[in-house]
Structure formats: C-alpha cells, structure tokens
Image (cartoon, rainbow, N blue to C red):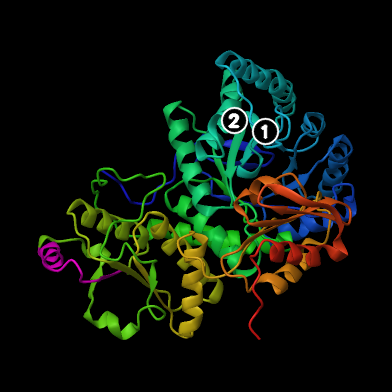
Amino acid sequence: MKNLNYHRRSTWPVKVGKVELGGDNPIRLQSMTSTSTMDSEGSVAQIKRIIDAGGEIVRLTAQGVREAENLADISSRLRAEGIDTPLVADIHFNPRAAFAAASRVEKVRINPGNFVDPGRVFKKIDYTDEEYAAEILKIEEGLLPLLEICREHSTALRIGVNHGSLSDRIMSRYGDTPAGMVESALEFLRVCLKHDFRDVVISIKASNVGVMVETVRRLVAAMDAEDMHFPLHLGVTEAGDAEDGRIKSAVGIGSLLADGIGDTIRVSLSEEPECEIPVAKAITEFIDGLSNGKEVPEVNQPEGYNEFNPDRRCSEWSDKLPQIVGLDIPVSEMDTALTVMAEDGLTDELADKLKEDASRTVVLDSADANAIGHIKAFMFGMMNRGLRNPVVIRRDYSGLNDEQLVIAASIELGSLLLAGFADGLWIEAEGYQRQRLNDMALAILQAARLRISKTEFISCPGCGRTLYDLQSTLRDIKAATSHLKGLKIGVMGCIVNGPGEMADADYGYVGAAAGKISLYKGKECIEKNIPSAEAIEHLIALIKANGDWVEPEK
C-alpha cells in the first residue's frame, strides 16, 4: 500500500556550525557567493545580503589553498560583526584546498567526480574487477585525511555529486546515468561510515530536472538498503534565470520535498545570490502547507509502476503531447468533460461511468492543501482499474500573488507530470490573462521535458570561478538566440561542470580563462580561447554552420 500523506524522510541530524539540519529540523535555506574568495570585503558584503534575505548557510568557492586560507579572514570579519552564519568551502580538483579549508569553515563540499579521480576527459577506460577494486581503495586513502581534519575541528562534509562531473572511471563502468551518480556518492559514504564519520550531507544534482529527481529517489532507496540515513541537500544545477529558472527549480526541488525528501535546498539562479533565497522560502512555505491537507487514503501502487522514473500513463491521448486548456483545447470544450474532485475518491459508480466511455475526458481538481497526494491516489486508482480516460489536471490559484502562483503551479503540476499522470493542464487564477497562464503551463511542461516550446538555456549561477560577466552575457545570448525553439544552449562560467552539464545541450559557451571563451557542440570543444567581446558572434556562426539557425521573425 502506498501512503501519499506528507511526511518528512527520517534522517540523521548534522551540525553545520550553529545550524543543525536533518532530523526534526526545518528545511534549511542556503546560497553561494559569486565574488572572488580573495576579495574579503566584497565577499563579506555579499554574504550579509544573503543572510538579510534569509539565508542560513553560505558557500564560497575555494579553487586552491590560497583561497581556502582566505576563508579564515572572511569568517573572522563576519564573527567580529556578531554574524555566526556557517560558511562552506566548495572544492573541486584540489584535495589540498579541502584540507586547508576544513579547519577554517563549518563545512567542506567535495565532488566525488574529481576529489580522488582525475577530472573527466570523456575517456573510456576498461577496468578488470581487480583494477576497479584498487581504484576504490584509493578513495579511502584520499578521503581519510580529510575526515580526520573534519573530525578534529567539528567540520561537516558535503559529498556533492554533479551529473556534469562524473569521473571517467564511473562513466566507464556505469555510463552517464543515474546509477553512476548514485554509485559515485555511495563509494564515499561507505568510507565515511567505515570510519564512523556521520557529519555528512549529500547532494546529487543535474540540470535536467527529470534526471535530478530520478537520481535522488534512487539514492534514497540505495541508502535505505544499506541502512544509511544521511540528510540531503537539493538543487537543480544551471537552472538559469528569471521565471524559467524559478520554474525549473521549483519543479525539481518541490517534487522531491513533496515526497518528504530533502533537508536543505539551494535554488541556483544566474542572478545575484540573494535573489535565490526568496524563491527557496516560497518553495518551503508551500511544502509546509502540505501537512494541513486532510488524510489521503492508502492505495495500491499499480503493478509495474516505476516510482523512480515513471512512464506517462496510457490513455486515449497517449499519442499527443500534453495539452493545455485555453491553448490546445478551448475552455468551452471542457463542458463535456467529467469534473471530479480528487479528495472525493474514485467510487465504483464513477469508475463504471468512466469505463462506459474511455474517450470521455476527466477534469481532475482538488481543493485540498495536499492536492498532490489526493490526485496521485485518484490516478493510482484509475490505473489499478485499467481506466484509460484522458485526464486534465485543473488547479485554481486565485488569491495568490505572482511569485506564489509560479511556485505553487510548478510544484503541484510538475510533481504530477513527473509522476506520469497528466494528459493536460488547466491553470486558473483570477486576475491573470489566459495567455499568461498558458505560457506558465508551457514553461512547466518544458521544465519536465515533456513539451518543448522555446529555447532552453542551461546557465550556471556563477561563483568565484566565473571568468566573465555571466548575467549580462546570458542576457545578450538570450537576445540573440531565444527564437530558436527547441535548441538547448549552455552558458557556463568555468569548466568545472561545463562540458558535463552541457552534454545535454546542443551548444555551449564556457569560460576558459579571464576574458576568454570556448565554444562547444555537445561535448566537443570547437573553438578555444575566443575573446569574450567576439564570442557571441562566433556562437551564432557555429549554430549557423551546423544548420540549426533560423532568422528571427520581424
């Protein structure tokens, strides 16, 4: 039986300085600075803006030992002002930077893809089982010194797996898959438990929302199987900016939080970092409201239902892209549909009526705070009875302001889309134009990768590693290419996740050095070290050379 009432996953609590996360603690909000870590004054000012917005934990990049050591100066300046917000060092490629940071900040984030293994070059390596086991031993040898420093200084550790930076070793055995991402995390977690180090938080992220959600669910199942209960940090990497970035983040983070998974979140936007916190707050406030819903009756999960990566439910509309009421379907046509409130349940009488005419559309609505749970239960009931009627999910968000509307619709509808349940979406909200609501529905469908209606920009939020003005560049790239429907363009500040996260993109624009840009077609670097002033022109030429350019409509 499936329990669809809202309840948090039970995790071990972890202290990060004064802040405890996991256990019975609230979902913690965090962000990351975009300043140079060598700029103490600028970093302190930005950290204070993040804290003023409601951030509880702040991360800074530490490329090398010099930056790691300067974290002590940033911390001391904050402590002198009475600010005790925990700081986190973000480490890639450089274990020595991690060792230096672990005595200076409250948490260190390492990436299993490049902490012991060398950075990926997309090289296939054929290991024997014995050779692979020897590589695993190297992880323990490399990680143990960091665990000892963290233990001595009561420093927490984040093991942060990114889809864009899996090692060639993992890729060679598992491929670029959720299974590989999960195993990358587990290899490090097993070492932590072997040496009784439990002050560990895990993140496992991707820019593709579906991949991110599936992978986190698989990680939770794998940890349960090994009796691990580490808290989870959630985020969608390279979500972009503006409303699309907010929608993509809310669909991914919100879908997992609604399942009770997640203890701390970061919304990654290509904007000033303090702009991320209000979005994170709106997500957690919506999730808190789920517990106010009335009880959802237990229901059998349909046989063959893949809870990690569900297929779209078979219906009379399965051959169509998900429809939008008001765009593909006039509102007037829904007069012939059967409108049902999910919390009323699927009665025998209703099931018989639907079975009589499998083409009759069901408009499934809910007035309950936990509409997600009630709608999922109703849909499971339909699947268990073999009912193939098309289902349009209708939600009315009247009374919400614009930000609340975007977040609520993205979490609710995104969760149901990723569960495979919707043949159509119908958003209502008093005071909003139909076109506005249609555009929002299309953006949610695109975030779930179920219907593509515009260019998708995979852009990182920027950090101290960023090698050009990310925000203005993203605006300029959007202005030049946003008419290229269906094209995916990556805009990345540096090479840490660049080529990897852009494996899902058609074209990539990546910071290569100060003022220099490299351009990619998929994973392949086509041009290196272009002056940034010329790089957008070169990007357009690359798109044209590959036949993907169309002229914008005048």
Residue 350 on the magenta span = yes
Q: Amino acid at mark 2?
A: Ser
User: Residue 354: x, y in percent?
Assistant: 15, 66
Q: How many marks?
A: 2
Q: Examine the rendered structure and indicate whether residue 128 appears above or below residue 234.
A: above
Give neighbour class at mark 1: few <14, some 14-19, many 20+ (Cα, 10 Å).
few
Give the side of residue 222 with respect to residue 344, left or right.
right
Give residue 123's mark: 1
User: Residue 517: x, y in percent?
Assistant: 82, 55
Q: Amino acid at mark 1?
A: Lys
Q: Residue at x 42, y 28 (%)?
A: 225
- Calculate the distance from the C-alpha at mark 2 to the C-alpha at mark 1: 8 Å
Label 1 near label 2: C-beta < 8 Å?
A: yes
Which numbered disc flags the more N-terminal residue, 2 or 1?
Answer: 1
Give residue 172's mark: 2
Residue 51 on the magenta span = no
Give the side of residue 84 with respect to residue 300, left or right.
right
Q: Quarter of the image for the N terminus: give it.
A: top left
Specify start and end residues of the magenta stretch as a single range: 349-366
Secondary structure at badge 1 equals loop
User: Residue 42: x, y in percent?
Assistant: 87, 56
